[in-house]
Amino acid sequence: MNNGSFIVSIVYQVQVLQVDRRNWLDQFQKAIADELTELGIHKSVTVSVGEGLVTTGAPSLVLVFGGTTTKNDPSMKAELQSALANGLLVVPVVDNVALFTNQIPEEVSEFNGFEWSGSNPARQLARMVLEQLNIEERDRRVFISHRRTDGLAAAEQLHDQLTHRKFKPFIDRFSIEPGEEVQEKIADVLEDFAFLLLLETPDAHASEWVYDEVDYALAHVMGILIVQWPGKPEQVPGSAGLPRLVLEPTDIIRDSHGYDVFTRSAIEKITYEVEAAHARAIVRRRNILLRGVQDSAKDQGASCVPLKDWALDITGSNGKHSIVCVTPRLPTCGDLQHLDETREQIDASASAQLIHTARHLSELKRKHLEWVAGERRLEVVSENAIGGKW
């Protein structure tokens, strides 16, 4: 790694099919470049966006920009048939889902699409595409930290909104079963969600639970975004200098029960910032893990080749191969499956390690992962135990 970036750039491809949407293409190309730069991976990841045919072998997808002349364009149909025959993911994009069938060719009329509307649609589409290419995280989880006395209504409102935006949000009121030990459950969830959204209401600073949640997130290098109420409420101890979205007085209204809730425009603003902050945080965690693996391998005289989907092909000084994948959350059986499949593609005889960030795995979790790994020679390794591995 060089200055925290991969030496070799991993290339992904996006083919755009359009007839009368050149302005969308220009905006989308810029949005992809801006997103990669903000994520800090613009030197290690290249996403080629253009109207040319996708080159086989590179991770790819196809966007169809619908328009008034798109549906029956003969060249569009031919390129779509080629993309589908090659098994590529095709995503239709329209400016109004009510006009979907009028703007999209019949070949993909049954596919789920994306609506080019709302706040900064090019950036929203860029994030969706990066998720589909497994550059950004598809599995989006947010732990909502709040003080019940003055933040519960707003937290519930955000929970509903984020759920509709394909997030998996956590609020203790909804997600902890009767009889469960609350603080132990919250610590496990924070490990597994890896991103904390703090509602900094006037009473939040006085909550011991909120303080513990922020302290835990900081100690475990998790992503954090603070939504600060108007009037500069007292900060939660230890949160100075953390990223904050400062609300205006017009962003907050009182509901029929007298509780603070967000306006529609405020909800949209917060959601947009959460999406951006979450993407940066998870990519940062993955980068930190990969950097640690590469540094450790280099110290042992090994060489590393970056692979797609956040993996490494390591060749030790003895010539033996090792395939390494990383996860920014608690390791899962799906992570082990991805590791096993990646190894099969590169070198079935290689050893394989899944590196995770969790400081502690429960006995039940550890045994389950061991059972899933079975006889496949898959190791689950904590990031603080990788020294000298290669």
Image: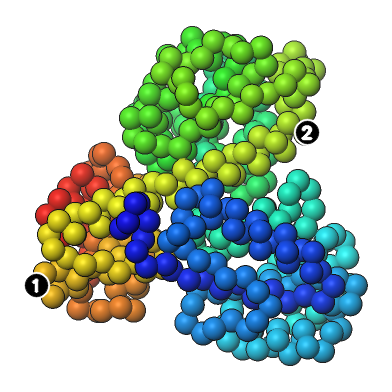
Picture quadrant of residue 2: bottom left
- Image quarter where the N terminus lies is bottom left
Q: Considering the image in quadrants, where does the C terminus appear? A: bottom left
Q: Position of residue 185 (x, y in %)?
A: 38, 32
Q: Which mark is residue 318?
A: 1
Q: Residue at x 20, y 78 (%)?
A: 349
Q: Nearer the viewer, residue 339 or 226?
A: 226
**Residue 283 seen in this snapshot:** yes
Q: Colour mode?
A: rainbow
* Residue 241 appears left or right of 120: left
Residue type, mark 2 in image: Arg
Give me the C-alpha separation between circle 1 and circle 2. 60 Å
Q: Say above or below: 267 vs 183.
A: below
For residue 189, say whether it is visible. Answer: no
- Count how many numbered circles sit on residues in the image: 2
Q: Which label is found at residue 264?
A: 2
Q: From the top left corner, tell me how far across and down residue 344 is, in percent.
A: 30, 78
Camera-nearest residue between 162 and 346: 346
Q: Position of residue 60 (x, y in %)?
A: 55, 74
Q: Looking at the image, which residue sits at the far left?
A: 318
Secondary structure, mark 1, is loop
Mark nearer the N terminus (1 vs 2): 2
Mark in the foreground, 1 or 2: 1
At label 1, which amino acid type do we have?
Answer: Asn
Q: Secondary structure at mark 2?
A: helix
Report the disc number at residue 359.
Answer: none
Q: Residue furthest front?
A: 3
Seen at 73% across and 64% down, the residue is: 26
Instruction: Determine the image quadrant of residue 360.
Output: top left
Q: Residue at x 78, y 33 (%)?
A: 264
